[in-house]
């Protein structure tokens, strides 16, 4: 059974996880193949590029809305989620949002939620239950401000505590800037 401490709804679940990748192509192939077996889509969003759980939820909600409208930006739901997470239309700019070779800390997003699929993945991933991923360090703040092109004036007006809201705004604006 899915443990508490995660976010889940009818459309998706979000689970913070750590995992290691030696061969990225093999790992992504495993995710796709097992996802097809369980009739789910899986997206791993890099914790270091996400402004907390609200950013993840916003990206998922808008990507699903776009996908269901039958006028998506991307050819796959996985790419649609990554584009919304990055707030960009160009797939060449979303690389930092996905997993990479080596150690990874990601928000594991399963669309729709599937206990069986999660159990299939649990041999390759460790669930994170003792860390607050909504905390934005100084380094992460600089990274997010730079990537999402947030101006000093925006930070001055809203305050540092609203950085996540500003990032979510960029995510939502992708719908308008299609």
Image: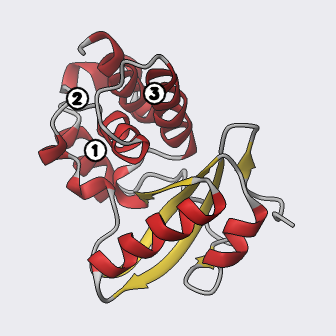
Q: In which quarter of the image is the C terminus?
A: top left
- Please tell me in which quadrant of the rendered image residue 75 appears: top left
Residue lying farthest top? 176
Q: How is this picture coloured?
A: secondary structure
**Percent x, y for residue 166?**
38, 26
- Residue 51 seen by the camera: yes
Residue visible at 18% across and 43% down in the picture:
91
Q: Which of 22 and 134 is in front in this view?
A: 22
Q: Identify the residue position indicated by label 3 in the image.
A: 67
Marks 2 and 1, the one that precedes in the sequence? 1
In the picture as drawn, the residue positioned furthest to the front comes out as 37
- Is disc 1 surrounded by few (<14), some (14 to 19) or many (20+) residues within 10 Å? many
Residue 62 at x, y percent in the picture:
48, 25
- Secondary structure beneath dot 3 equals helix
Q: Which of marks 1 and 3 is in front?
A: 3
Disc 1 or 3, which lies upstream in sequence? Answer: 3
The residue under the point 23% across, 48% down is 94
Which residue corresponds to mark 2?
150
For the residue carrying disc 2, how many other residues have a C-alpha within 10 Å: few (<14), some (14-19), or many (20+)?
Answer: some
**Residue toward you, 47 or 143:** 47
Which numbered dot is residue 144? 1
Q: Is mark 1 on a helix, strand or loop?
A: helix
Question: How far, Cα to Cα, is label 2 from label 1?
Answer: 8 Å
Labels 2 and 1 touching (C-beta < 8 A)? yes
Residue 119: x and y, percent? 72, 75
Q: Residues within 10 Å of mark 3 (few under 14, many from 20)?
A: some
Q: Nearer the viewer, residue 124 or 161?
A: 124
CA distance separating discs 3 and 2 = 27 Å
Q: Earlier in the sequence, mark 3 or mark 2?
A: 3
Q: Which of marks 3 and 2 is in front?
A: 3
Question: Would residue 156 be visible to someone looking at this image?
Answer: no
């Amino acid at each position: 059974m899915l443990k508490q401490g995660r976010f889940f709804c009818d459309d998706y679940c979000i689970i913070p996880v750590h995992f290691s990748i030696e061969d990225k192509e093999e790992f992504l192939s495993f995710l796709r193949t097992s996802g097809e077996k369980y009739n789910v889509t899986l997206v791993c969003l890099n914790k270091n590029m996400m402004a907390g759980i609200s950013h993840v939820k916003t990206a998922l909600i808008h990507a699903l809305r776009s996908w269901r409208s039958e006028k998506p930006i991307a050819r796959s739901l996985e790419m649609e989620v990554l584009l919304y997470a990055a707030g960009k239309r160009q797939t060449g700019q979303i690389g930092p949002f996905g997993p990479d070779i080596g150690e990874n800390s990601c928000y594991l997003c399963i669309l729709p939620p599937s206990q069986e699929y999660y159990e299939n993945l649990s041999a390759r991933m460790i669930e994170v239950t003792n860390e607050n991923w909504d905390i934005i360090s100084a380094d992460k703040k600089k990274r997010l401000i730079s990537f999402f092109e947030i101006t000093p004036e925006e930070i001055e007006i809203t305050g540092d505590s609203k950085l996540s809201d500003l990032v979510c705004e960029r995510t939502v604006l992708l719908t308008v800037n299609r």
